[in-house]
Structure formats: C-alpha cells, structure tokens
Image: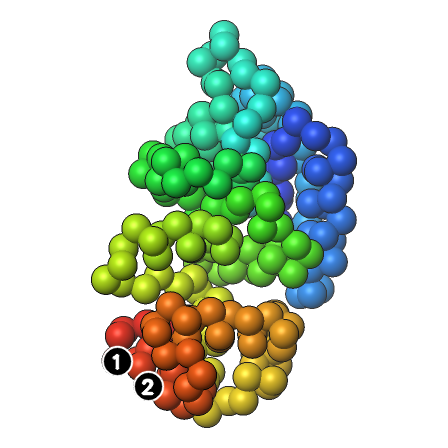
Amino acid sequence: MPQNINVLIVDDHPFIIQGYKNVIRLFPDKKIEFSFFEAVDCKSGYDAIMNSEIKYDIAFLDVSMPSYEEKNIITGEDIAKLLMNQMPDCKIALLTMHSESLKVQSIIDEINPLGLVIKNDLTFDSMILALGTMLKGEKYYSDSVIKFLNNQQKEKVYVDVIDRQILHYLNKGVNYDDIPLYITISSSSVKTRKENIKDLLGISGCEDSELAAVAKDRGMLL
C-alpha cells in the first residue's frame, strides 16, 4: 500500500500553488502518494488548520500573505506558529522572497522551521530535494540561507544535509558521477555543491579524496 502524505500549501498566488503541486507529483518515490490542501491567505490558512479533520504531514507556507487581523495572524510565520501548536508533528517549510539577513535570522530564531527556502533559489531539482530531505525529518535550507549562515559564522562551515550526504559518499570512495545512484540529485548538482564546499574550506582545486579528509577532520560528515 502506498504511503499517503497530506500536504498543506499556503500561498496567495494560485499559480505558485499549482506549480508546487506539479513538482511534488513528480517525486520519484512512487511508494508515496500526496493529498493536497490549499489556502490563499492568512484567514484561509487559519481555517485550513483549525477546521481540518486530518493532520498535515508537511506544509509549505509563504511568509508574505494578506493578514487575518481578527485572529492576529499577520504572516506565514504566524501560520507556522499556529501549525506547530495544533499539529506539532507537521514538517514545516517557510518560503520567502526576502533574502535579507535580518529576515532570515528572524525566521530561524522564532520558528526554526525544518525547511527555509528563498524563492529565488527554487528550481525543480531543489524543490524535489527539499521535499525528500524534509520527509526524512532532516533540515533543508536553500543556497541563499546557507550563504547567510556561513557569513555569520566564519569559524564554522555550514553545509546542509545534501552536502553532508555527498561528503559521506566521497569519503566512501564513490566517484561524484555515481553519487546520484544513492541520493536524488543530478551529477551536475553534485559537482557544483562539491566545488562550493571546497571554496568554503579554502581548498579549491584539491582532489575529492582530500576534500573528504578535510571534511572528516572538520566534523562535517554524517
């Protein structure tokens, strides 16, 4: 029997909701089926949570939406807080156009969502990665969020779970071209991420074996 995942999408642009649904339906694990529930502003988002007879497994929430002042639900962050209170097992991703450092830090401090995505970072591949990562209960931050975190903490290199998986397989001696056999990511994305990690560590141009050794020494492996 396929596993059913209830997905709540709250965004004030219907075509964006449809886009998310179209991508999610192409998730490669065919043992999973998705049921979708939608809301287009803070009021309908509030109603979708408070009046629901089912529990949502995962939610994608836009940060900026028309408010519901009667209930003091002003942004998607307030929807996230409500969802955390009503359905604490729901995996929450917040999506925002705002890449400013203060906004990113505020979302992390106040909500600490399992997923945080700057919309300009979104591609088909990154949406699939975000979904798969979160379904495993692991944190997914998009590229701009990771860059912000790395700028904030110079002494510590922040990499997401996908980077850690790449480093894990490189450490096992797997060629980067073969890593897509183990995780849902293209070989070109593996190469890009691998080179970005080398840049962050200040070892650009090194062999993958050296990257794995340095990453292991820095405690970056899974």
Residue 183, how many percent across, how many down?
57, 73
Residue 5 seen in the current view: yes
Residue at x-position 42% and y-position 55%: 146
Residue at image mark 2: 213
Q: Is residue 163 above or below residue 21?
A: below
For the image shown, how many numbered marks are present on the structure? 2
> Which image quarter holds the N terminus?
bottom right
Instruction: Mark 1: give few (<14), some (14-19) or many (20+) Cα within 10 Å.
Output: few
Please state which of residues 176 and 70 is positioned toward the viewer in this rendering.
Answer: 176
Residue 200, how many percent across, how many down?
38, 68
Residue at x-position 39% and y-position 50%: 148
When asked about the image quadrant of residue 212, the answer is bottom left
Q: Secondary structure at mark 2?
A: helix
At label 2, the amino acid type is Ala
Looking at this view, name the residue that lies furthest to the top. Answer: 70
Residue at x-position 67% and y-position 65%: 29
Residue 176, how many percent across, how many down?
55, 84
Q: Secondary structure at mark 1?
A: helix
Please state which of residues 117 and 154 is positioned toward the viewer in this rendering.
Answer: 154
At label 1, the amino acid type is Asp
Colour convention: rainbow
Residue 91 seen in the current view: no
Q: CA distance from mark 2 to mark 1?
A: 6 Å
Q: Is residue 202 above or below residue 174?
A: above
Query: Does residue 155 appear to the left or right of 220 in the view shown?
Result: left
> Which image quarter holds the C terminus?
bottom left
Q: Is residue 92 above or below residue 149?
A: above
Tell me if label 2 and label 1 are in contact, CB under 8 Å. Answer: yes
Residue at image mark 1: 217
Query: Does residue 101 appear to the left or right of 90 in the view shown?
Result: left
